[in-house]
Amino acid sequence: MNDKPLLPVIAGPTATGKTACAVALCRLTGGEVVSADSMQVYRGMELLSAVPTPEERGGVPHHLMSFVDPARRYTADAYREDAKRCISEIIARGRLPVLCGGTGLYINAVTRPMSFSEQSDEAMHAELMAMGRTPEGRRRLHGMLEAIDPDSAARLHENDVRRVARAIEIYRLTGLTQTEQIRRDRACPGDYREVIFGLDWPREALYRRCDQRVDEMLAHGLVDEVSRLMVDEQGHPTAMQAIGYKEIAAALRGEVPLEKAVHWMKQATRNFAKRQLTWFRHDDRVIWVAAEGRCAEEIAGEIAKKLQTE
């Protein structure tokens, strides 16, 4: 086990301060950040996906952000290939790769085999995605998943059409649910000596941070970003799955007041954080680190000490 490369992972729900912690850890260890966020990979969605600004990156190299055309289908298997290449290149430079993000599936794609990710059928996926273009279709699609894989259905919101469709696709292609595939892969060793740290906040404090995150996104031009994406919705199908897009787009179309759209976006963000927390709570590899009332440098210092024993 000890001959495998060390891979620290900073994980947890949205708005927990993962980026600041990862940057501080990289400064202490001579590291570089590899993003594990399924939305941050897409270009033109920097605010919707909360891509860290140059100031927030603090001079630390960040990888796998804003490099995929939003019209392209980008799978967990593609991410695994890109992330492992980045990790190998960082190690070859004599630096420490630090995986950072809240997409549990992407973290697993790097640290576990994920045999199902190589199975795909573009025509089937397109058909399922087309079904999810209307509210009625999204409910029907989610019901299909609930019938075959209730655990995945409980984990995924019906508006998360891309992941719901993918879970159905996996079952149709392999005969096994995504839940069962993940369970089997957990029993297999990965390529790294991963040490996963989850940033832990009291629930109410986390929800306040989620609301604050939305306010900051709006202050930095979220409405303008959504407006640009709306010009070519068919060319940006992934953008439509991002929290905030549907809500702000509805306001721009005059369907609801902006204040109502912001309320919906904050609620959706809190719900998303809750689902992320549920995912990571079920991963017994996660070492939870208290974050409330502590600066990123203090948290990173604690993590760096723990890494010295690995």
Image (spheres, rainbow, N blue to C red):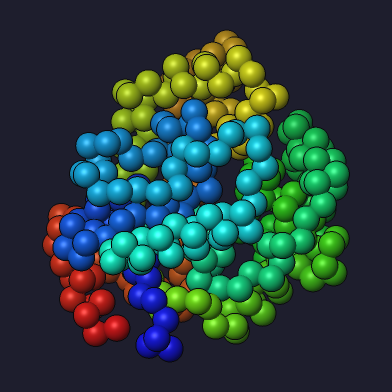
* Residue drawn at (57%, 11%) of the image: 254
In the image, taking residue 95 as reference, residue 189 lies left or right, namely right
- The residue most toward the top is 254
Q: Which of 262 and 73 is in front in this view?
A: 73
Q: Position of residue 270 (x, y in %)?
A: 44, 46
* Residue drawn at (30%, 48%) of the image: 61
Determine which quarter of the picture holds residue 151.
Answer: bottom right
* Residue drawn at (67%, 42%) of the image: 73
Determine which quarter of the picture holds residue 94.
Answer: bottom left
* Residue drawn at (18%, 57%) of the image: 27
Q: Nearer the viewer, residue 27 or 275?
A: 27
- Quadrant showing the N terminus: bottom left
Q: Position of residue 72 (x, y in %)?
A: 66, 37
Residue 97 visible in this rendered orientation of the protein: no
Q: Nearer the viewer, residue 259 or 65?
A: 65
- The residue most toward the front is 92
